[in-house]
Image (tube, helix red, strand yellow):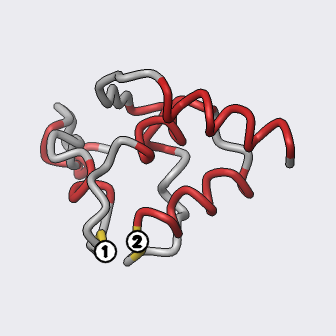
């Protein structure tokens, strides 16, 4: 737990921008949606998500907002319509 707290303290010291990838976002697929920022951070820590996921969540503005899905956090998260394949063909 000390290691996690050390990393979280380092996160709070460096100004960065959120950077999401499909791989990073996949760690939140099973998150307990809807969830607050703190709940998502707790889930990420407990589930062993990479530090980049926790860093991204730390950068969310915390106004007590409840997030319904990953799309609320990463608006450009690709939907099934974004992929170029026809499910009926398979």
Residue underneath mark 1: 64
Residue at point 30% right, 69% down? 67
Nearer to us: label 2 or label 1? 1
Residue 48 locus on image (x, y percent): 73, 45
**Which numbered marker is on residue 40?**
none
Choose top left, top right, bottom left or bottom right for residue 50: top right
Q: Residue at x 40, y 71 (%)?
A: 36
Q: Is residue 59 left or right of residue 87?
A: right
Please tell me whether mark 1 sits on a helix, a strand or a loop.
loop
- CA distance for labels 2 and 1: 7 Å
In the picture, measured across the screen, residue 53 lies left or right of residue 70, that is: right
Residue located 32% across and 56% down the image = 70
**Residue 20 or residue 23, whichever sits in front:** 20
Query: Which residue position is annotated with label 2?
Result: 36
> Where 13 falls versus 38 (above or below)?
above
Q: Residue 83 versus residue 26: which sits nearer the camera?
A: 26
Quarter placement of the C terminus: top left
The image quarter in which residue 76 lies: top left
SS at mark 2 in the image: strand
Decide which of tag 2 and tag 1 comes sooner along the chain: 2
Q: Residue 49 at x, y = what percent? A: 65, 42
Q: Is residue 68 visible?
A: no
Confirm whether residue 7 shows in the render.
yes
- Position of residue 29 in the picture relative to residue 7 (left or right): left
> Marks 1 and 2: in contact by CB < 8 Å?
yes
């Amino acid at each position: 737990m000390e290691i996690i707290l050390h990393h979280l303290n380092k996160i709070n010291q460096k100004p960065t921008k959120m950077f999401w990838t499909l791989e990073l976002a996949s760690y939140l697929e099973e998150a307990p949606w809807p969830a607050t920022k703190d709940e998502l951070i707790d889930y990420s820590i407990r589930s062993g998500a990479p530090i980049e996921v926790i860093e991204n969540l730390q950068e969310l503005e915390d106004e007590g907002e409840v997030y319904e899905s990953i799309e609320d956090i990463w608006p450009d998260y690709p939907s099934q319509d974004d992929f170029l394949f026809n499910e009926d063909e398979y």
